[in-house]
Every structure is written in C-alpha cells, then in structure tokens.
Amino acid sequence: MANPRDVVRIPDAKVALSTASVYPESTATAFEIAARLGYDGVEVMVWTDPVSQDIEALRRLSEYHRIPILAVHAPCLLITQRVWSTDPWVKLRRARSAAEKLGASTVVVHPPFRWQRQYARDFVEGIWRMANETDVRFAVENMYPWRYRDREMLAYAPDWDVTKDDYRHFTIDLSHASTSRVDALAMLDRMGGRLGHVHLADGRGSAKDEHLVPGRGTQPCAELLERLAVTGFDGHVVIEVNTRRAMSGAEREADLAEALAFTRLHLASAVKVPRR
C-alpha cells in the first residue's frame, strides 16, 4: 500500500487497442470497441481486411468514433505477403505515408524473414534511412525462433532478437518474449531509451505465439508497466491480444476491458517524494 507521503504518477503513455485484437471481427469493429471501452486510440494492423489498407476509410472511422490512430503496423506477416505490394520496401513506404496522413506517430515493423535475403542484408541501414526522412518512428519489433517439437528454426534476419542490431526505436512484444523464452525485463534494459512502443500481451512460454490477456500468463506484464511509469515512458502501450476463442462479442469485449483495466492500474505508479 502506498504511503501517504507517496504520490501516484501516471506517465504520458497512451493505451491503444490493436485492431488485430478483435480478429476474426473487422477493423471497423475494433474502432467501435476501442471507443466504447475508453481506449486512448488504436493501432491499425494492415492485413487482408480491405478497410485496414484504405487510408480514407480509416480516417472516416477515426473521425466517426472520435478515436485517434496512434500507430500503423506494416503488413509484415506471412498472410500479408501481397498486401500493399510484394516489395517489402514499398510496404514500409506506404506504411509511413499512411501514418503521416492519419496522424500516427509510429510504424511498427518486423525484421525480415531469412528468405528475403536482399531485404535482410539492407534492413538495418534502410530502416535508418527511412527514419531520417520522417518524424514518424520506425519501431522494430522483437520476434522469436520458430519451434516444432525439439527443432528450432531461425526464421528472421538479421536476428529475431532486435537488440543485437542498431535501430533508432524498438517495439517490445511480451508475447514474443515469452515464445522466445527470454527475460523480457532484461530485453527492456537492453532497449533502454530506444524503446518507443509496447505490445502488451501475456504468454506461458509455449512454442506458439499466445498473446494472452495480460495477467493470465507468466510474463512480467505488471512489472514492465510499473517500470515504464517510473521512467516516464511517453510512447504507446498497445493491447495486442488473441480473442479468437471468445464465444461471443460480449466475451471478447470483456477480455479487452480487462486488459485495459490491468494496463491502466499498473501504469499508475506510487512514487516517493521527499518531505520539504
């Protein structure tokens, strides 16, 4: 319990809902739920939903629901290999353009797949070049090795652990940290002041990328949020959870409300201040 001489400090970080969190519902549904539950904004996952690829449609949703678009997740997934071109650099340029037009401050990007050899060779330098051309942050996200039974495949290059390379900004994803079986707080320390963006979700160390509601796994979600509060983190904390097993819209919404409440609670940090 906080001492009466303590004060509660809440960082400037905004809490957003990833549109991926409502899958298999639509991008439009994510805006509706985020507004109704009181999220500060949304992160748009650009994928096969045509609305997620349409800047004007996204602008209309943002204006109608009065909820800002805080980040754009570039189409880096296996299922989005043909979204916004097959050229990965074109995808990133379009993501940057979308972020600029929609007022989003961040583009989230995954490291390349290993079979994207030329893209992987040029990736670190290319991300720096693109970051120097805009005020939008390119926040590169930690990934994980792919596992099947006792076999492990390194699917990303230069590395799934993005702290091994030099990027201006990072995204830390706690579900990915769980799947890769690394210490998320140690990874946070390595990112240091270059942490620009957070994907908050839980996990139990499974080989599958679980994206559980925070508090339902073994990841230090609460501890990470409390550290962000103490250090005055001013990026965005994005709820990116898997609600595909929800039996109804009400159950999905309850999960997303729980995730928001958990995040806001642990971002409120009691900070001791000395007596005068």
Image (cartoon, rainbow, N blue to C red):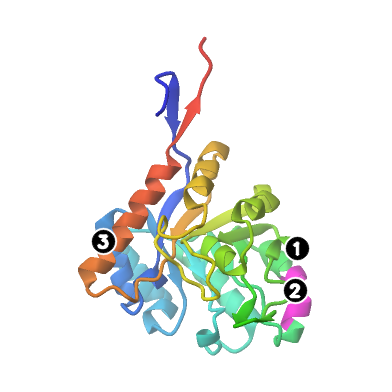
Residue 186: image tag: none
Q: Name the residue type under label 1.
A: Lys
- Whichever of callouts 1 and 2 sits on the residue coming sooner in the sequence is 2
Instruction: Give the x, y percent position of residue 193.
Output: 66, 47
Residue 254: image tag: 3
Q: Are marks 1 and 2 in contact (CB under 8 Å)?
A: yes
Say if 4 sits above or below 22 in the image: above
Mark 3 burial class by Cα count in 10 Å: few <14, some 14-19, many 20+: some
Nearer to us in this view, 101 or 127? 127
**Highlighted magenta segment, given as a residue range:** 119-126
> Is residue 122 a member of the stretch shown in magenta?
yes
Residue 164: image tag: 1
For residue 242, which quarter of the picture? bottom left
Q: Name the residue type under label 3.
A: Ala
Mark 2 = which residue? 158
Instruction: Give the x, y percent position of residue 5.
Output: 44, 18
Nearer to us in this view, 24 or 63? 24
Say if 69 sits above or below 225 in the image: below
